């Protein structure tokens, strides 16, 4: 700056200290922190984040920004609508009709023919639980351990991830009933019959609740277990659970907030990986690309049941700008082939990491598919002792090499890889090379 004669350029180090101080003072200890010395991010482009000192990082954790940071088409269409009109859904405008039609075109089944806009994943899950309650007349819900569904009262009630809340399993209300996470790698049931065994637990619980005259109105599950590290339930699990829950009059809620919208590569929705057609689907994150937008997809008769308790609208989710944002994202995903890119680039990472496991014993398993992957680190391949400290060290070392990766699961030993869907094969290979080098240091 002195060479250029610019004396009033803000000191980026001082700005970083100020941002950290303000965050600590205003949000306090509840703010989630990934690094002891986090970079202060100033801008983004594609799958890159750039800090105040001009360093670029490959963003491997941002499943919120599905179409990438600062996408020019998205920014232009949202800006144009902001200059025209922004108000809530009580008024009639074409933008919402267009968004609904575009989203329903991706519906996994014609029976899911109704869209309700919301402002977040938490609100989507909250509304889904309300819809299940009014449609079935039942309050009780079956939820899966190690799951995260949101922060509203209802969404938090069915969230059991100890990472987000160490006392989650002990603080559930009486209407929430828990079953084990269907994890065939380190869970109670393993091997080819794991799916059927985990599903029997749900069926047994559903029958018990019916016998106790408080039958479950819904079963809620992420079709890929996000907070567990991208674990895919064993084959047959979701369909068998659906049969058991529906036999007792309950509904299936598929929480696709983290894994929907083509992120899984081979499927636009996580539920279709196992051939399940849910009764209710919740979406957010990718749906708005960090704009406040989510949605609930369901059947018309389920939504109509809500009229018995009143009407519904979402102040932020139902605006014309939110609708334009949602349509733009779906257009970009389709026009740029981002679902296909997720499948292709995800294979580069998954195959590369599996090859690394032959010489790095810390790698226990690679979970997930597409661009929702979990690299589980263990100290022993028999006991599966979690390598928590090693995972934290790997994340810090990767940051130094220009890659932002987050440790996940209740054991904090899974490197979660969930980048923008625009991640390139070149950056994927660079990540595998960096992980190889970092594991060599940690090993």
Image (spheres, rainbow, N blue to C red):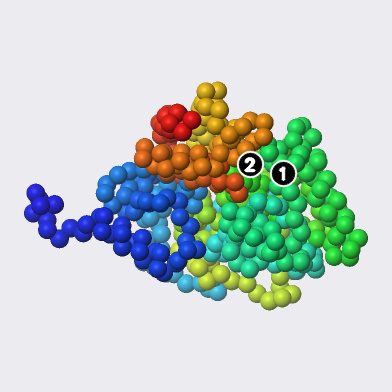
Q: Is residue 213 visible?
A: yes
| Residue 233 image-quadrant placement | top right
Q: Which mark is residue 182?
A: 1
The picture places residue 148, in percent across and down from the top left corner, at 62, 55
Q: Position of residue 427 (x, y in %)?
A: 41, 34
Helix, strand or loop at label 1? It is loop
Q: Nearer the viewer, residue 174 or 273?
A: 174
Label 1 to label 2: alpha-carbon separation: 8 Å
What secondary structure is found at the residue carrying circle 2? loop
Earlier sequence position, callout 1 versus callout 2? 1
Rendering coords of residue 442 (x, y %): 46, 33
Q: Nearer the viewer, residue 14 or 343?
A: 14
Q: Quadrant of residue 299?
A: bottom right
| 52 relative position to 284: left or right | left
Q: Residue at x 62, y 54 (%)?
A: 162
Relative placement, left or right, of 275 versus 226 is right
Residue shown at the point (36%, 40%) measured from the top left: 400
Residues marked 1 and 2 touching at CB (< 8 Å)? yes
Q: Which mark is residue 231?
A: 2
Report whether 288 appears left or right of 117: left
422, above or below 163, in the image = above
Residue 435 can be seen in this image: no
Q: Nearer the viewer, residue 222 or 127?
A: 222
- Farthest residue in the right direction? 211
Q: Residue at x 68, y 64 (%)?
A: 171
How many residues crowd mark 2 within 10 Å: few (<14), some (14–19), many (20+)?
A: many
Question: Is residue 157 depicted above or below 417 in this figure?
Answer: below
């Amino acid at each position: 700056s002195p060479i250029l004669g610019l004396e009033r350029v803000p000191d980026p180090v001082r700005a970083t200290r100020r941002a950290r101080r303000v965050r600590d003072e205003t949000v306090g200890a509840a703010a989630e922190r990934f690094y002891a010395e986090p970079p202060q991010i100033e801008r983004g482009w594609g799958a890159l984040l750039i800090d105040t000192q001009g360093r670029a990082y490959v963003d491997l954790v941002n499943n919120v920004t599905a179409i990438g940071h600062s996408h020019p088409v998205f920014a232009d269409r949202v800006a144009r609508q902001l200059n025209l009109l922004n108000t809530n859904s009580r008024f009639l405008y074409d933008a919402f009709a267009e968004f609904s039609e575009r989203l329903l075109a991706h519906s996994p089944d014609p029976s899911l023919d109704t869209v309700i806009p919301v402002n977040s994943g938490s609100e989507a899950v909250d509304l889904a639980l309300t819809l299940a309650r009014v449609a079935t007349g039942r309050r009780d819900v079956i939820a899966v351990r190690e799951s995260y569904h949101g922060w509203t009262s209802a969404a938090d009630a069915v969230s059991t991830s100890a990472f987000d809340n160490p006392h989650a399993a002990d603080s559930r209300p009486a209407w929430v009933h828990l079953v084990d996470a269907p994890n065939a790698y380190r869970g109670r049931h393993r091997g080819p019959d794991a799916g059927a065994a985990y599903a029997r637990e749900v069926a047994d619980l559903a029958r018990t609740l019916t016998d106790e005259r408080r039958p479950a109105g819904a079963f809620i599950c992420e079709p890929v277990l996000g907070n567990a590290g991208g674990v895919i339930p064993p084959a047959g699990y979701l369909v068998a659970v659906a049969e058991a829950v529906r036999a007792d009059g309950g509904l299936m809620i598929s929480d696709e907030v983290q894994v929907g919208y083509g992120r899984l590569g081979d499927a636009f929705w996580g539920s279709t990986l196992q051939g399940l057609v849910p009764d209710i689907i919740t979406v957010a994150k990718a749906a708005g690309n960090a704009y406040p937008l989510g949605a609930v997809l369901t059947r018309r008769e389920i939504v109509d049941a809500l009229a018995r308790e009143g009407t519904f609208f979402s102040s932020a989710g139902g605006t014309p700008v939110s609708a334009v944002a949602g349509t733009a994202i779906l257009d970009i995903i389709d026009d740029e082939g981002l679902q296909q890119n997720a499948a292709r680039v995800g294979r580069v990472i998954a195959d590369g990491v599996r090859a690394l496991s032959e010489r790095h014993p810390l790698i226990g398993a690679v979970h997930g598919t597409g661009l929702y992957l979990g690299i589980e680190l263990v100290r022993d391949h028999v006991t599966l002792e979690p390598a928590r400290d090693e995972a934290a060290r790997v994340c810090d070392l990767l940051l130094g090499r220009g890659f932002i990766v987050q440790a996940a699961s209740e054991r904090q030993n899974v490197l979660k890889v969930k980048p923008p869907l625009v991640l390139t094969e070149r950056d994927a290979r660079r990540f595998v090379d960096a992980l190889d080098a970092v594991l060599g240091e940690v090993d």
